[in-house]
Image: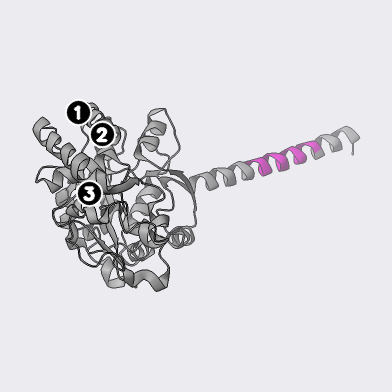
């Protein structure tokens, strides 16, 4: 055989093999990309056991980026961040994202587990009551933790912060909407009130009745200090408080949502506009709302089943508070331009002598 012909034949065969390998490489790379779900979620908000089960059942990889505040999440999306398939905003930011047309409309035919969403949470979800753009992930509220070994008698009310006998043993959250909203609720007003007279009454309650008795404003280290015995009464989230309490001390701690009601939140699962894996995102949202899967989430955080009507049957732990305690609570709404008014009041609350 002519050496040149033989060489050309080998060259052609080699080229075919290289092209086949490249094709296989790009196919597998594309396949991996198609089977990767990208979440933008609050830190440690979905149990790893749930992620592992989803990955195994659907043959996918789940990659999670975390945010620590709604403002951080929103700022990143607004600045053009792409690639996320499911995000977890709270109700006021879900409302904003809907208004800005930044969310995909959900195909309910691919979400059969919506049948388990509680009518109570839907009644509260006035920003998206038909779940066109969001599916509730969890509905809850901050409350008050009390060390019963140090405080034997108390009303389950924000009035506890008015008690001068507990002065210098209590903390309130360093959170404008929580504290102002709770004072509004305590005084019988909406947590979203923008009425000047109502806001003045709420401000005076905080400044004159609550503030003189607290050690500090604290949204970060209160649970550790409470567990160490430095504080007797703290405002905060149950899951944060109990995560710091030793097993043998659990029966010394009470946690309650004040009877007059307080601010409430609904974190939701949404698909941002332009998501590449919409079908996989829908599978994930539907998977989360399987009662037996959702029960794992509730057990992880000691939550009551406020969102899923059937999950409680599969729970293996006792929640730190009851869903019924939320009956008088109200969702924090987007205040729009009135946020400036709240900011000014909060600065006065925080720094007035």
| Relative image position of residue 196 (x, y in whole percent) | 11, 30
Q: Secondary structure at mark 1?
A: helix
Residue 8, above or below 159: above
Q: Could you tell me how far apart the alpha carbons at marks 3 and 2 are, in whole angstroms? A: 19 Å
**Marking on residue 264:** 3
Residue position for label 1: 338
- Crowd rating for badge 2 (residues with CA inside 10 Å; few <14, some 14–19, many 20+): some
Q: Quadrant of residue 23?
A: top right
Whether residue 110 appears in magenta in the rendering, the answer is: no
Q: Depth check: give the residue in front, 256 or 26.
A: 256
Indicate the position of residue 299 as horizontal and vertical percent values: 36, 66
* Residue at image point 58% right, 47% down: 28
Nearer to us in this view, 154 or 264: 154
Q: Quadrant of the N terminus?
A: top right
Residue at which label 2 appears:
346
Question: In the image shown, does 351 or 300 lie closer to the viewer?
Answer: 351
Locate the C terminus by quadrant.
Answer: top left
Judged left or right of residue 330, residue 221 is right
Q: Residues within 10 Å of mark 3 (few under 14, many from 20)?
A: many
Looking at the image, how many numbered discs can be counted on the residues? 3
Q: Relative to 145, is 14 above or below?
A: above
């Amino acid at each position: 055989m002519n050496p040149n012909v033989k060489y050309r034949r080998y060259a052609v065969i080699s080229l075919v093999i290289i092209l086949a390998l490249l094709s296989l490489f790009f196919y597998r790379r594309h396949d991996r990309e198609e089977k990767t779900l990208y979440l933008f979620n609050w830190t440690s908000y979905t149990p790893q056991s749930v992620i592992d089960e989803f990955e195994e059942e659907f043959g996918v990889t789940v990659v999670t980026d975390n945010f620590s505040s709604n403002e951080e999440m929103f700022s990143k999306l607004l600045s053009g961040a792409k690639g996320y398939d499911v995000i977890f905003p709270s109700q006021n930011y879900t409302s904003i994202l809907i208004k800005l047309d930044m969310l995909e409309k959900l195909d309910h035919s691919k979400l059969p587990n919506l049948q388990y969403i509680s009518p109570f949470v839907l009644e509260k979800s006035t920003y998206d009551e038909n779940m066109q753009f969001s599916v509730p992930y969890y509905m809850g509220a901050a409350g008050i933790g009390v060390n019963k070994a140090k405080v034997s008698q108390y009303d389950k009310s924000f009035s506890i912060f008015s008690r001068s006998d507990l002065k210098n043993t209590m903390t309130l959250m360093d959170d404008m909407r929580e504290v102002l909203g709770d004072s509004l609720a305590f005084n019988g007003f909406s947590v979203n009130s923008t009425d000047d007279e109502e806001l003045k009454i709420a401000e005076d309650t905080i400044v004159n009745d609550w503030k003189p008795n607290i050690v500090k404003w604290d949204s970060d280290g209160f649970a550790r200090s409470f567990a160490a015995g430095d504080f007797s009464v703290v405002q905060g989230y149950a899951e944060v408080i109990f995560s710091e309490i030793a097993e043998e001390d659990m029966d010394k701690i009470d946690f309650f949502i004040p009877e007059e009601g307080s601010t409430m939140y609904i974190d939701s699962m949404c698909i941002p506009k332009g998501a590449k894996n919409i079908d996989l995102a829908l599978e994930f949202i539907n998977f989360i709302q399987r009662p037996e899967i959702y029960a794992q989430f509730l057990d992880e955080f000691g939550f009551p089943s406020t969102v899923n009507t059937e999950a409680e049957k599969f729970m293996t732990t006792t929640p730190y508070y009851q869903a019924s305690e939320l009956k008088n609570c109200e969702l924090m709404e987007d205040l729009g331009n009135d946020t400036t008014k709240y900011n000014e009041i909060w600065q006065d609350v925080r720094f007035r002598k």
